[in-house]
Image: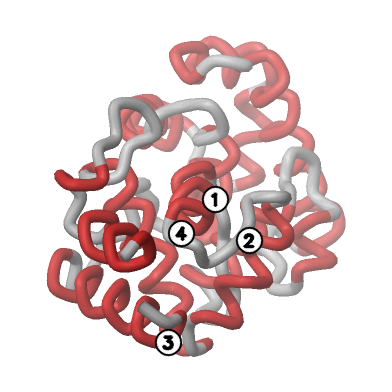
Amino acid sequence: MNKATKIKFISDKLDELYPSPPIPLDFTSPFTLLVAVVLSAQCTDIRVNQVTAVLFKEANTPAKMIKLGVDRIAEIIKPCGFFNTKSVNIFKLSQALVEKFKGEVPHTFEELESLPGVGHKTASVIMSHIFKLPAFPVDTHIHRLAERWGLSDGSSVEKTEADLKKAFPKEEWEKRHLQIIYFGRNYCKARGHKDEECPICSTIRRKTRD
């Protein structure tokens, strides 16, 4: 199976399984999505949604988050893990939004990545899902599957992002990012994976070997 055929097969299968993939984090604004993505590091989306249901009742804007304070933020988000670091980052990024951006989430990579606790992946999520600008966020699932499917070599997240941007049309990036995450969780897990039981690996990896 050549690369173009492989990419078409993967795209068709993802569209079949996840025609309209939802964003797995609960949010009501650019700010609440930003906070949710910061919390999602080393934490499941289910746990994040449980925590933000409480957090956003008390503070759903940068100004309210500042008033809440680091200690109260930490108390609420403790189930997410790394809560000490995350609570400080959420407090400080809220301060930065108020002081530098009039309380609004900025819409450039440079500005987003200047915020405490916001790296390139988090910025990419905001750019893609909030501002609908071309971005391809790469999490652990996407990084793993891109290598497993032979779309990248797994050497770095940066290379995976660049390779996937070449593999899929720009207008598909937002959808593909979500589809691959869901597929990785449901069918193509890190542990106990068997090619023959996977709707994509069972075809592309067998044909590659043949």
Cα separation between marks 1 and 4: 28 Å
Q: Which mark is residue 29?
A: 4
Asked if labels 3 and 1 touch by Cβ distance under 8 angstroms, the answer is no
Depth check: give the residue in front, 77 or 127: 127
Please, which colouring scheme is shown?
A: secondary structure
Give the residue at x 62% y 16%.
82
Q: Quadrant of residue 70?
A: top right
Query: From the viewer's perspective, is the residue at label 1 or at label 4 nearer?
Result: 1
Task: Classify mark 3: helix, strand or loop.
Answer: helix
Camera-nearest label, 4 or 2: 2
Q: Tag 2's secondary structure? A: helix
In this picture, is 50 found above or below 116? above
Q: Amino acid at mark 2?
A: Thr
Query: Measuring 29% from the left and 35% from the top, which residue is drawn there?
Result: 193
Tell me which amino acid carries mark 3: Ala
Give the distance between the C-alpha atoms of the residues marked 4 and 3, in whole angstroms. 38 Å
The type of residue carrying mark 1 is His
**Which mark is nearer the camera, 1 or 3?**
3
Query: Which mark sits nearer the N-terminus, 1 or 4?
Result: 4
First-in-chain label (1 vs 3): 3
Mark earlier in primary sequence (1, 2): 1
Give residue 112's position: percent from left, percent from top: 75, 60
Distance (Cα) linking label 1 and label 3: 20 Å
Q: Which residue is mark 2?
A: 160
Callout 4–callout 2 Cβ contact below 8 Å: no
Q: Which mark is residue 143?
A: 1
Q: Is residue 26 above or below residue 108?
A: above
Residue 127 locus on image (x, y percent) = 60, 70
Kindly identify which residue carries mark 3.
Answer: 4
